[in-house]
Amino acid sequence: MSSQDVRSRQVGTASGALAAAGASRPLPASHWWRRYAVQVASTDALAVAVAVAIAYVVRFDANGAARVDGTFSPTYLSLSLVLALVWLAVLSVGRTRDRRLVGSGPREYARVLGVTWRLFAAVAVVAYLLHMQIGRGYLAMTAPVGVVFLLLTRLAWRRWLRRRRRRGELTSAVLIVGSRGQAARMIDELEHLPEAGYGVVGVCVPEEREPSGDVAGVPVLGGVDDAARLATELGASAVAVAGSDAVDSETVRSLGWDLEGTGIDLALSLGLVDVAGPRVVVSPVDGLPLVFVDEPQFTGRRYVAKTALDVVGAAVLLILLTPLLVGLLVALVVADRGPVLYRQERVGKDGHPFHMLKFRTMVVDAESHLEEVLALEGAAEVGLFYKPHQDPRVTRVGRVLRRYSLDELPQLVNVLRGHMSLVGPRPQVAAEVALYDDLASRRLLVKPGMTGLWQVSGRSELTVDESIRMDVRYVENWSVVGDLLILSRTARAVMVGAGAY
């Protein structure tokens, strides 16, 4: 059998393995992306139209007379139409619907915010320079209302897309180029993040001219020289190069040339683990792209913004949740005559201890029965993130509170007092902190949070290593937009009650 026949057989094997797995075969992005982009563009247009209409109606009456000073201003109708069209144009030109951004991460939302802010800043500057009589109240109302509607519709579409991708649908086929070990790591990462929407259909291993075996269950189809042809035959949307000494710059450049005109993306993995995009800066130096990684930020204006979000958010939530808090207090008093609140010393930012508040979910003398629980669980001592699956000390009402994280609502007071943040790593007791290694110690560089990345990614069902890794990833890459995304995901996780006990 010729090598060409072997490769054709391997290509067929890759497609057959995907079908046998019971999942939809990953497709070229163009097969589903155009329809998705049109759908998102349609809701973008609706959001912008509603925002502009609300601002116009609030400022003017049905005849176009301003509600503030009573003067007639027909130009505002034309201005509203032009503003809406330009707004939609910059959303498109600003690549806010780039298929490589949707599904996960804050970049899509950040681009929507960025292009909108720049548009309205430009309108304000032009209006000032040309002495145009554009009401500041009109612009001040249109921008935030539009942003809220845009982000809400984008969030709805993202949730829809993620649900489909978790079922193996609307994924893009990817061919990986790299050594077997590095390809296996990339395959593992993509499999653990189905929401990203990438399905690996084959591997090309440098210096292996003849295809043989598989990597993490994905067939090896050939060498680097075969990558462009194989990607076309498999209908791949991208060729991902995992960092490898065997894949040098000349090889990557040649691969890029081979992919020109095919519509297939070339993606390069830098081998940077848990480093988010905002910290990565690419600076070309005489044709050589240097990748700079910014150090994590724990002070400055962004941290002030995070603190403001914490204070305002906690205060608003306490006001809105007052009826619920009163109801929970009554339920706890009726069910158990003991103390309603439970205070426990936890370790916060920079290792400073504080007393964390919770609704009491255990019997009054729970601490004295810890050794009995450890014996039942077969554990010799309390370890990192230790939480018994079936803790007999938890009361009947306490189980309901824990399932929906209602026992943690008093921590809003900790947030207002500056001990905690709305989003961050969960605070742990001193005995657990004493077990930290250098990696886990990074959790103490920011304020602990009521919710965090690992809480919305599986909660107590995650392993210790996975939980620590997610917390450290958050600590080193946090952003205000990312916090807002985690808070929105927390609301869903709490309602479902998955992974909590």
Image (cartoon, rainbow, N blue to C red):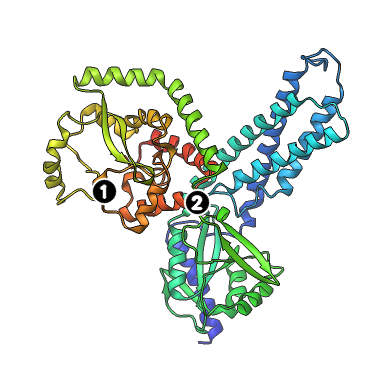
| Image quarter in which the C terminus is found | top left
Residue 325, given in percent of the width and then of the height, sits at 36, 21
Compared with residue 88, is residue 396 higher up or lower down, i.e. above or below?
A: above
Instruction: State the SS at label 1.
Output: helix
Label 1 or label 2, whichever comes before in sequence order = 1
Tag 1 and tag 2, C-beta contact below 8 Å: no
Residue 398 as seen in the image, left or right of residue 27 = left
Q: Nearer the viewer, residue 430 or 18?
A: 430
Determine crowd level at label 1: few under 14, some 14-19, many 20+ residues with C-alpha closer than 10 A: some
At a point 74% along the width and 29% down the height, the residue shown is 139
Would you say 116 lies left or right of 305 here?
Answer: right
The three-letter code of the residue at mark 2 reads: Asn
The quarter holding residue 268 reads bottom right
Query: Taking 498 as reference, is 122 left or right?
Result: right
Residue pointed to by mark 2: 477
- Residue position marked by numbered label 1 in the rendering: 432
Residue displayed at 19% across by 22% down: 338
Give the residue type that dot 1 points to: Glu
The picture quadrant where one finds residue 67 is top right
Depth order, front residue of 371/97: 371
SS for callout 2? helix
Residue drawn at x 44%, y 53% is 473
x, y percentage for residue 494?
A: 39, 35
- The picture places residue 29, in percent across and down from the top left corner, at 61, 57
Q: Residue lying farthest bottom? A: 2
